[in-house]
Amino acid sequence: MRKRTAIVWGVAILCFVVLMLVTPAIPQSQEYHNFADQREFFGGIPNALNVISNFPFLVVGIVGLVLCYYGNYFKLSLPGELCGWTFFFVGVAAVAFGSSYYHLEPNDARLVWDRLPMTVAFTSIIAIFIIERVDARKGTFSIVPLILAGIVSILYWRFFDDLRPYAVVQFVPCIAIPAMAILLPPMYTHSAYWLWAAGFYLVAKIEEAADVPIYNLTHHIVSGHTIKHLFAAMVPVFLTLMLAKREVAEERISLLRMWRISWTKVKSNSTDVEKISCEYSAAPVEERDK
């Protein structure tokens, strides 16, 4: 087991090194700070809607933290789970402050504080997946190293103006989490909520890219970036609902296997359906004497 773990880490590090060697540096575009909606509301708050749309993160983060420690409401049973989910909800709540601070005056220096709490949330989720679906002990020990790796990626971008490590930290979870949710057998029920969360995050990224078109499409009512905040906040909402509803699974079956079983049942049921045939015969028509 240790040998396999070492091989996995070795391959991951080798892929990262090769990526850094063969790809050019990705500097932070200053156009990124030029958001579509720069209106002032509520007593002169600059970029007001992009600022206040971060409030849901604070609400969900605080609710999640309270429920984590309120009589074990989430029924966390594995070592390290409480630590992992604590880091996640702290990161979510901190997004409200970091992102609001950034949007008050968008620039590279403030963008650090926008990305930092998001990175803590991303990396803690990866550790939670390892705890639940691979190995509880290894996942617990991976929490701090993964979070530190995320922080280092932000510092690397800030000092060297190169987004490559941060891009890896941000986008690898977007691929790994749905894949792990589908392929690896879960310890708990309601695994489909992971896919709902991933779906909302994907839509949020699309809305972020379509900031100006959405602003124009809505006749300057709301921008894509504002809506992006609201959709991104649905990610911790669905994960909180999952934690509240789930139970320890009686049998550990991956989503992929469950889908295959369901599809097999549907196919077998369709073959058992009776075919009803109807025969129509022409009825004789009596001619009446005129």
Image (tube, rainbow, N blue to C red):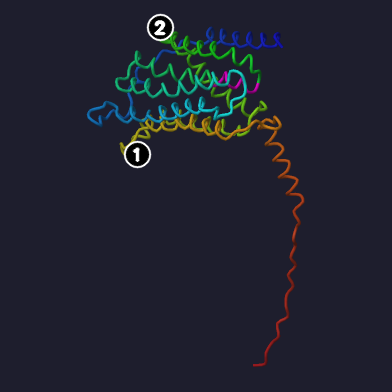
Q: Is residue 5 above or below residue 216?
A: above
Of callouts 2 and 1, the N-terminal one: 2
Query: Which region of the structure is painted magenta?
Result: 125-133
Q: Residue furthest front?
A: 71
Label 1 element class: loop
Label 2 element class: helix
Q: Is residue 179 magenta?
A: no
Asked whether 107 or 190 is in front, the reply is 190
* Residue 210 visible within the image: no
Residue drawn at point x = 26 percent, y = 27 percent: 45
- For the residues labelled 2 and 1, the Cα–Cα distance comes to 38 Å
Task: Judge left or right: residue 226 versus residue 19.
Answer: left
Task: Judge left or right: residue 31 versus residue 267.
Answer: left
Residue picked out by circle 1 = 218
**Mark 1 crowdedness (10 Å alpha carbons): few <14, some 14-19, many ≥20:** few
Residue drawn at point x = 56 percent, y = 20 percent: 126
Q: Amino acid at mark 1?
A: Thr
Q: Is residue 19 above or below residue 174?
A: above
Residue drawn at point x = 74 percent, y = 53 percent: 273
Which numbered mark, 2 or 1, is in the foreground of this view?
2
In the rendering, at what x and y percent does residue 196 appear?
54, 34
In the rendering, at what x and y percent does residue 244 appear?
55, 33
In the rendering, at what x and y percent does residue 261 appear?
72, 38
Q: Residue 191 lies in what quarter of the image?
A: top right
In the rendering, at what x and y percent does residue 84 appear?
54, 19
Residue picked out by circle 2 = 159
Asked whether 285 or 185 is in front, the reply is 185
